[in-house]
Image (cartoon, coloured by chain):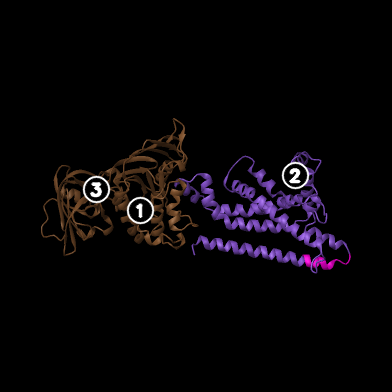
Chain colours: A purple, B brown
Amino acid sequence: MMADPFLSAESWYAVFLSLRVSLLATLCSLPLAVWVAYLLARKDFFGKQVLNGLVHLPLVLPPVVTGYLLLLSFGRRSGVGQFLEQFGIEFAFRWTGAALAAAVMAFPLIVRAIRLAIEAVDPKLEEAAATLGGGRFFVFRTVTLPLIMPGVIAGSVLGFAKAMGEFGATITFVSNIPGETQTVPSAIYAFLQVPGREGDVIKLVVLSILLAMGALMASEWLARRQVRGMQGQ
Amino acid sequence: MTLSVRISHPFPAFRLDVDLEAPEGVTAIFGPSGAGKTTIINAVAGLFLPHSGCITSRGATFFDSDRRINLPTQKRQVGYVFQDHRLFPHLDVKANLNFGRRARKIGENRADFDRIVSMLGLEQLLGRSPFALSGGEKQRVAIGRALLSAPEVLLLDEPLASLDQMRRQEILPYLERLRDEARLPILYVSHSVSEVARLSNQVLVIDQGQQSVLGPVGDVFAHPHAAGRMGAEDLGAVLFAKVHAHHSDGVTELASAGGRLFLPKTNADIGAFQRVRIRAQDVMLSRQKPEQISALNVLSGTIVDISKDPDQSGKGVLVRVRCGDDLLLSRITLRSLNALDLRVGEPIYAVLKTVSVARGDVGQG
């Protein structure tokens, strides 16, 4: 790759990898997060507290521990890892592993935001929809989902930002391999270990701030458009 | 097209027992708050699961505890108008109205849509968001939404309770049209005597979960036991009468089974059937035909029975007078009863001032 006047090839890779990892992590966990949030907000079932605890565990556990647990469960020597390898899916020390780590770390934040949004929807509206002939899925699709959209957007942005910044679990699970698993935080960490690369660090820091601000503003705009649509103006 | 509801359910405080056949038209479920009224229509809608009983509509079994049938809400063709309108805030009025058709996957029926929209006067509101509607408009949209979901039964849970007096008067005529045009069994939950008097064909009086009286509105309103549930001030008979003439001095003359009635001028057409609620405390009794008296209505009749005043204070009595086919109620003091020495079976004149009949007490028959 040609020398870039602004960023080194290594840094560029880290930026694109971070974006790819965060996007994949957010999009893949979103449907599951909506489902789990719905269960936690609206259903009573055996083991609800256990599920709630499991979902929130990555929020309170040291990220290194989460990363190590991922390594134990999805590593090449684990049962799951070996099973998935047969289908050509590998996580440990691959960029997909970084996405998995980011997804696990972002999941509680996404679920939380969506759960709050679902709890704010009056179940009486869903009841009314049922009296009008709507089955459970129809009611979810046409009433609940549109009403929680601002929460879904907020949760996604929060999750995306968390994924962009995820460091501890990622470096433990997939290490810090330039051009393979080195995300922006890992790259900043790596550059800080080498004298004379403060310039690269500053550039990545500025870029991180810009991306985070962009994501926040995009979510504000989307949420506002949603609310305006709801008030029919 | 009859709805049949037979359910019982033990609650901690009381036991609910209802056995009701609702034909086309309005069956009012009347009773004080907490009597179990809403529970009955929730059971019909499938929002409440009673302990035992059977609910059928037009041959379809909604619920049968013996046969272990409990159709989910969305499979029962009921239209439900809630006390709080429950419009979908993210949809405009038109989309709210069409929600039931979308949910039941029935194609839009232009004629139906237009008919119901014009019946409820919603033409100007279709593009609006529920946020931009007044309380009365919201409730009208909610009624339209329920009607457009092609229901076989309509359930209304105190649809006017959340509205102020002005809005109530605005919606009542729409509900009267609904009663006369929808050709559906309509269960109308209310604790308002005036609404029930104005709208219902049949009344079920319920108290502490127990069905105390069930019958045609005229009978129930003149029923001493049912009267006990209505409170002394609200108590009164419901008469049906035909508009005979509008007089230029601001009085409308109606022909009832008991004789001519003179009421404050209405805008009903000549020949139209009207129902009139006459409060028991507005009716005076006289042994002789009063002459040179300002009251315009003097009806002759016979005393059917004399019972205790529902407020139980012992100071008043309730006299039922049969005038032709109609029953009138008069609430007088014990002192007057004794002074006139009134007895069951004797002829009597009932006297009513025209101005004591409020505008809201006269409605479409």
As measured in the structure, the alpha-carbon distance from the residue carrying label 2 to the one carrying label 3 is: 89 Å
Q: What stretch is highlighted in magenta?
A: A195-204
- Which residue is depicted at the point 19% across and 49% down? B337
The one nearer the camera, B155 or A181, is A181
Q: Residues within 10 Å of mark 3 (few under 14, many from 20)?
A: many
Residue at mark 3: B317
The one nearer the camera, B99 or B108, is B108
Chain letter belonging to callout 2:
A
Quarter of the image for the N terminus of chain B: give it: top left
**Do the residues marked 3 and 1 share a common chain?**
yes
Q: In which quarter of the image is residue B16?
A: top left
Task: Tell whether position A201 is magenta.
Answer: yes
Residue at mark 1: B116
In this picture, residue A226 sits left or right of residue B145: right
Above or below for A46 versus B259:
above
Circles 3 and 1 in contact, beta carbons < 8 Å: no
